[in-house]
Amino acid sequence: MPVTNIPAPRIPFIDERTGLMAREWYRFFVALFNITGLGYSTISIEDLQVSNVSTDVAGEIAQAEQETRLASITARYETLTGAIEAAMLQPILQQTQAQEDIYPPIQVGTLGQQNADRGYITGYMDFWAQNANPPAPAAGMARFHSATTQGFTRFEQDNEATTNIVLGRDNVFIARNTTGSIIASRSPVYVTGSTGNVPNIALAKSNAIATLPAAGLTLDAIGINAYGQVMKLGIISNVNTSAFSTGASLYVDPTTAGALTATRPVTPNLVQRMASVLVSGVGNGSLLVVTAPFVGGLDSGTTATTWKFNGFTLSMTADSSISGTNTGDVAAGPTAYMMMFAHSMQG
């Protein structure tokens, strides 16, 4: 039962032994605080002195206690929720920080600050060079980054096929394999038709004009009826070129479809030069792809001074004239140089 009687006059307000409020007075004030609603009730001490409001006060006290407990539970829930969110976000934040350490964000140059009036960035942007190629992006996305090779930093593009293309260096187009067999990477291919606006390709072979001209080398293996990438001009890096010597010229093979050979084909085969070996190696090899223009029917002989054109054998003489197999078949001057130019364009 709350003590609501005022302590007797003989009881001092301050306990002389402790220097604090006397126990009787403390119990009196606590009782008043409780019956007036713990600070939540509108009942005043004057109300308690002039009327019997014990029932109302009890209800308000119960309600105040309930609200206090609810507030306490809510505070604990919010604290617990915050702790759980922090625990869940911590690994994500750590992973994000690790990614930023490996692939630093784009750095905006001093002239490329935000234009607050117009809402766009002007000037230039700097990209940190990556220590290694970033992971492949999701399907339908392209990832741009910078990379440094021997002190030279360039802008590169990666796609979902994990193909790394150096911008400004590599010329690549998309094609479809409709041969019924898988086309291996780095295979010379020629165009056989089209699917919509995409060319169809098959393995090139230099023993007949029907399987030429080659349009480029495949960058990746292309599945049956699948689409893939063909390089017409550029550099294919980190591949096995150990079968060839550094500096060797590579031609469309006349014996095996889709193969390259370092031996220049001879009559009756046709000639089309496809690439040069920049680095001969097992995993660090590279090819400089330069798909040569092809003039069907023109071929080089074994000495590179004779040509076979539509069944006629032509020979270049010391005076730069060209003689045919029949007596009097001679081409000199500009005609000879035109034949020589056509020959050189094929390798």
Image (cartoon, rainbow, N blue to C red):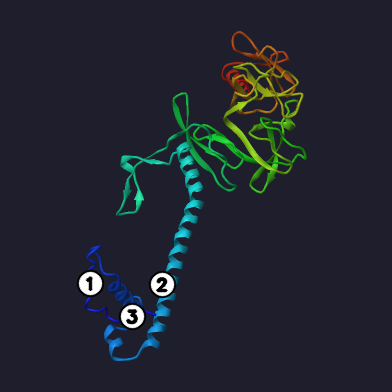
Q: Which of the two marks, 1 or 3, is nearer to us in this view?
A: 1
Under tag 1, what secondary structure?
A: loop
Q: Which of the two marks, 2 or 3, is nearer to us in this view?
A: 3
Q: Quadrant of the N terminus?
A: bottom left
Return the residue nearer the eye: 127 or 59.
59
- Quarter location, residue 256: top right
Q: What is the spatial separation of the Cα atoms under label 2 and label 3, in whole angstroms?
A: 15 Å
Q: What residue is drawn where x is 75% and y is 21%?
A: 268
Q: Position of residue 48 (x, y in %)?
A: 31, 86
Q: Look at label 2 and name its amino acid.
A: Thr
Q: Quadrant of the C terminus?
A: top right
Q: What is the spatial separation of the Cα atoms under label 1 and label 3, in whole angstroms?
A: 22 Å
The answer to whether the residue labelled 2 contacts the one labelled 3, judged by CB atoms less than 8 Å apart, is: no
Q: What residue is drawn where x is 41% and y is 72%?
A: 68
Q: Is residue 78 left or right of residue 52?
A: right
Return the residue nearer the eye: 163 or 46.
46
Return the residue nearer the eye: 84 or 228.
84
Q: Earlier in the sequence, mark 1 or mark 3?
A: 1
Q: Look at label 3 and name its amino acid.
A: Thr
Q: Earlier in the sequence, mark 2 or mark 1?
A: 1
Q: Look at label 1 and name its amino acid.
A: Phe
Under tag 2, what secondary structure?
A: helix
Q: Position of residue 277 (x, y in %)?
A: 60, 21
**Badge 1: few (under 14), some or many (20 or more) residues near its Cα, within 10 Å?**
some
Q: Earlier in the sequence, mark 2 or mark 3?
A: 3
Residue labelled with disc 2: 68
Under tag 3, what secondary structure?
A: loop
**Badge 2: few (under 14), some or many (20 or more) residues near its Cα, within 10 Å?**
some
Q: Classify 342 as above or below 230.
A: above
Residue labelled with disc 1: 13
Disc ID at residue 36: 3
